[in-house]
Image (cartoon, rainbow, N blue to C red):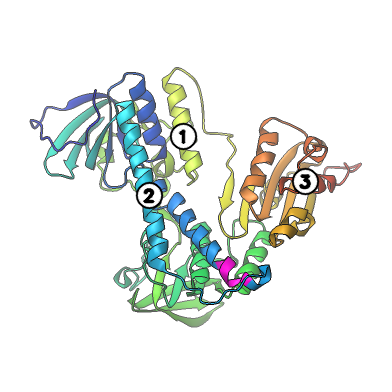
Amino acid sequence: MSNKTTTEERAPGKPEVYDLLVLGSGEGGKYLAWTLARQGQRVAVIERKYIGGSCPNIACLPSKNIILSAKVASYFFRGEEFGITKDNCRINMAGVRDRKRKMVDGLVKMHLDNFRGSSAELIMGSGRFVGPKTIEVALSGGGTRLLQGKKVVICTGSRAAIENIPGLSEARPLTHIEALELDHIPEHILIMGGGYIGLELAQAMRRFGSRVTVIERNDRLAHREDEDVSAGLNELFLEEGIGVVTGARVNRVDGTSGQWVKLHAVQEGSAIVLEGSHLLMAAGRTPNTQGIGLELAGVELAERGYIKVNERLETTAPDTWAMGDCAGSPQFTHIAFDDFRVIRDNLAGGHRVTTGRQTPYCMFTDPELARIGLSETEAKKRGIAYRLAKIPMLAVLRTRTLSETRGFMKALIDAGSDRILGFTAFGVDAGEIMASVQVAMLAGLPYTALRDAIFTHPTLIEGLIPLFSAVPPVAKSSGAVK
């Protein structure tokens, strides 16, 4: 069957039948569609706007593209440190945006090629369930189509949450989508949210030349991470001239983002006011599950509007699955891809589940934060005894050649054995270093395998040798939590 994006209008009441219908073309959905279509099944994917989902269009890849431009800018401003003049350095935000757009265009073309090559049909329009396994599509080019799937997968993703704060919606705040499309440098951007998205964009905007203030309701940045991570991020931001306001709850917003905004907040019982030119919302995500007729499909929702699924990603409706953000999976593209593998294997007769899988975390600030397995906070909360090894990134000689010595690495080792429980790095290319530790954990290798390995000098991964050489010996009584 040839791939097509069609505006053909079908006879009302008579659905077109597919082996698989996928609502949303995000990471998990597109890979499942391509895979089953290549096996000869009749497959259709319904996509409202972003071909390939948010990752290649408005989220992961575009943001990392912008972040790299900001890092290059930071090198220019640090030029004297490297013996290079920084005279006449100027940021062209339209050029920054256009570089990002060019990358996105290439990624969209790649996705269209994959749809054509797999024979999965891509239907552009807004889909809504009108019954079990039956979706009506309001086509982008006009008209409607009624589709029915023998099997249906929901992959509708999530969006930035806009809190119910007086004046907030009227202020028309930026989300990450609009922030990545800016063609000018905001004079002073206020960012509500001290999590991954807010912190990445805060640093990037500061490096482009904006004044930046981050407002976080909790008592520290990245509050779910260990305290030494939050402290490192706070120190980094203060050194780069980024304002940090923690423990503050915004209760009213005046003005319009892009012109002038004023946030009224309470911090430690006292009223404070913050003013800026732009407002960016980065305070959590909301699943895209409303207004798509899930109740008519027999699909129930869980807490906070996520689709209720079991460990096999099956919904409460027969032959209907959900994956990715809308199903409450950890909000990472790599997890959505693993959701695809769960459903793919189970459709082939396997028994693959989401429980017990490793979730690698990486925040692309500069330096990066990367974590796999248990953090100290989690280990203490669960009463798991561990031995701690920790070294500064300065001890990794490669960082000195890069002039990127900020941060640390640490590992949690089981108190009574050589098993690696967790690893955290706050440092240059932390995500790449983490992957090597993750592979060792997947293979069940003892930490001594990394300690005694021969790694190339001078590389960053070589730092795993001094790190794991710093593991304390097993105590005679190892029952106590570190």
Q: Between marks 2 and 3, how big is the CA–CA gap?
A: 36 Å
In the image as oriented, which residue stretches furthest toward the right? 476
Residue position marked by numbered label 3 in the rendering: 457
The magenta stretch spans residue 78:
yes
Give the side of residue 357 with respect to residue 100, left or right: right
Would you call the spot at circle 2 few (<14 residues within 10 Å), some (14-19), or many (20 or more)?
some
Quadrant position of residue 154: top left
Give the side of residue 178 with respect to residue 477, left or right: left
Q: Where is the N terminus found, in terms of image quarters?
A: top left
Q: Which mark is residue 473?
A: none
Depth check, mark 2 against mark 3: the one in front is 3
- Do residues under tags 2 and 1 come within 8 Å of each other at their CB atoms? no
Would you call the spot at circle 1 few (<14 residues within 10 Å), some (14-19), or many (20 or more)?
many
Q: Between marks 2 and 1, how big is the CA–CA gap?
A: 24 Å
Would you call the spot at circle 3 few (<14 residues within 10 Å), some (14-19), or many (20 or more)?
few
Whole-percent x, y for residue 367 in the image: 62, 59
Whole-percent x, y for residue 210 in the image: 47, 74
Whole-percent x, y for residue 156 in the image: 34, 43
Q: Which mark is residue 339?
A: 1
Q: Identify the amino acid type marked 3.
A: His
